[in-house]
């Protein structure tokens, strides 16, 4: 193996290690929580505000 | 383009045009959106004892709101008609955070509860409403299963005053099989909530044959005492056959009484039985001198003997927010 080829292989191996370490670091870092954006239009049926001052039938 | 929702431990990877497991957080063209922000499907006036919260402003009324959806899918869910429903099929009110706080102010509510389904899934709505409510001197209460990731949980706890958090069981197997979730994140949420300084009460729904073995109850109680402290109120709730658990009978009074006895014997100071009428299970007793402090019947306070949050007989300070 020539010196040039040896250096080329060394550089390739080095860059592969760097890429691997970066990938691992990215995976290990806690992901940032992103807030959801409000959807302007409700997909269901809309009703008028009523029974607000009554006790709920739901648990909790 | 797929979007990953980082709100809860399910970390749903959502395809464009699809929703996460909670049904209310969707991916529209690579943007994560909440479809229920400002659209509660339920808004009611409840006694705070119904949450249940027994150590937070007893006898007060609380404006209670919920939207459709949930990130857990408990087979025994008592509110499955709204928690396991798509928003498309659930009629809702138009009620942005400003309007919720306005209603609370108009009707002199001292607090707002985010409840019935799970406030975690309508996170942004809960947070913004809580922030506005706090500015108006109105307190915020969460009634939740605590299935949330640490980062958003810490942020939400900054604007909350009290929480009743379910600890539905004490084994991973129970959470996986019956709730389609996991136990560890719930335990972590409980510990973080208590450490944050908000008032925390815990509810355990006892379901015949699934989580009613005395040894399991003892294990749960020991975990609460070791990780949240003996002063943390624990509510054992009665199960009624609902949703996909219609084949099971309601929890017997005897089972609830045994659970209460175990918890008291293990050193918890305030143990209650709920969803059932019981002679002692709803009262608060002083952990020091054992005298009756608050007598309840259903959601009604019959007498409250506390003096400035302390026992009038021995002077012991009682865990809670009393005014």
Image (tube, coloured by chain):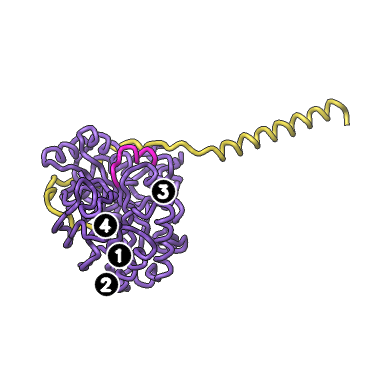
Q: Which residue is mark 2?
A: B253
Q: Which residue is mark 1?
A: B243
Image hue for chain B:
purple
Q: Quadrant for residue B15, please give it.
A: top left
Q: Residue furthest top?
A: A4
Image hue for chain A:
yellow
How far is disc 1 from disc 2 in space, using C-alphas?
Answer: 22 Å
How far is disc 4 from disc 1 in space, using C-alphas?
Answer: 38 Å
Q: Which residue is mark 3?
A: B191
Crowding near the residue tagged with mark 4, few <14, some 14–19, many ≥20 C-alpha atoms within 10 Å: many
How far is disc 4 from disc 2 in space, using C-alphas?
Answer: 23 Å
Q: Which residue is mark 4?
A: B286
- At mark 3, the secondary structure is helix
Residue at left offset 34%, top offset 36%: A37
Instruction: Specify the subunit that label 2 lies on.
Output: B
User: Can you see residue B88?
Assistant: no
How far is disc 3 from disc 1 in space, using C-alphas?
Answer: 30 Å
User: First in sequence: mark 1 or mark 2?
Assistant: 1
How far is disc 2 from disc 3 in space, using C-alphas?
Answer: 30 Å
User: First in sequence: mark 4 or mark 3?
Assistant: 3
Crowding near the residue tagged with mark 1, few <14, some 14–19, many ≥20 C-alpha atoms within 10 Å: some
**In this rendering, the label closer to the viewer, 4 or 2:** 4
Instruction: Specify the subunit that label 4 lies on.
Output: B
């Amino acid at each position: 193996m020539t010196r040039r080829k040896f250096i080329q292989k060394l550089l390739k191996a080095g860059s592969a290690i760097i890429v691997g370490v970066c990938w691992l670091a990215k995976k290990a870092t806690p992901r940032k929580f992103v807030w959801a954006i409000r959807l302007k239009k409700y997909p269901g049926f809309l009703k008028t505000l009523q029974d607000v001052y009554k006790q709920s039938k739901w648990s909790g | 383009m797929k979007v990953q929702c980082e709100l809860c431990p399910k970390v749903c990877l959502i395809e464009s045009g699809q929703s996460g497991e909670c049904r209310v957080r969707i991916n529209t063209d690579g943007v994560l959106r909440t479809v229920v922000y400002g659209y509660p499907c339920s808004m009611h006036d409840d006694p705070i004892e119904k949450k249940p919260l027994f150590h937070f402003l007893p006898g007060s009324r609380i404006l209670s709101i919920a939207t459709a959806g949930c990130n857990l899918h408990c087979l025994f869910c008592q509110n499955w008609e709204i928690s396991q429903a798509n928003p498309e099929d659930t009629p809702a009110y138009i009620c942005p955070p400003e309007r919720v706080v306005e209603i609370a102010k108009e009707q002199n509510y001292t607090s707002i509860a985010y409840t019935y389904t799970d406030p975690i899934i309508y996170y942004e709505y809960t947070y913004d409403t809580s922030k506005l409510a706090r500015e108006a001197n109105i307190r915020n209460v969460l009634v939740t299963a605590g299935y949330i990731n640490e980062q958003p949980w810490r942020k939400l706890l900054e604007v909350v005053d009290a929480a009743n958090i379910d600890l539905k069981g004490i084994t991973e197997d129970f959470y996986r099989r019956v709730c389609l979730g996991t136990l560890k994140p719930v335990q972590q949420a409980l510990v973080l909530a208590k450490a944050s300084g908000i008032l925390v009460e815990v509810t355990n729904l006892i379901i015949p044959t699934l989580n009613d073995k005395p040894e399991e109850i003892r294990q749960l109680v020991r975990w609460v005492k070791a990780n949240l402290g003996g002063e943390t109120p624990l509510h054992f709730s009665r199960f009624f056959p609902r949703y996909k658990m219609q084949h099971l009978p309601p929890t017997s009074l005897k089972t609830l009484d045994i659970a209460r006895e175990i918890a008291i014997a293990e050193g918890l100071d305030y143990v209650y039985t709920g969803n059932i009428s019981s002679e002692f299970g709803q009262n608060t007793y002083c952990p020091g001198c054992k005298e009756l402090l608050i007598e309840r019947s259903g959601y009604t306070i019959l007498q409250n003997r506390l003096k400035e949050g302390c026992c009038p007989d021995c002077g012991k300070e009682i865990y809670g927010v009393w005014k």
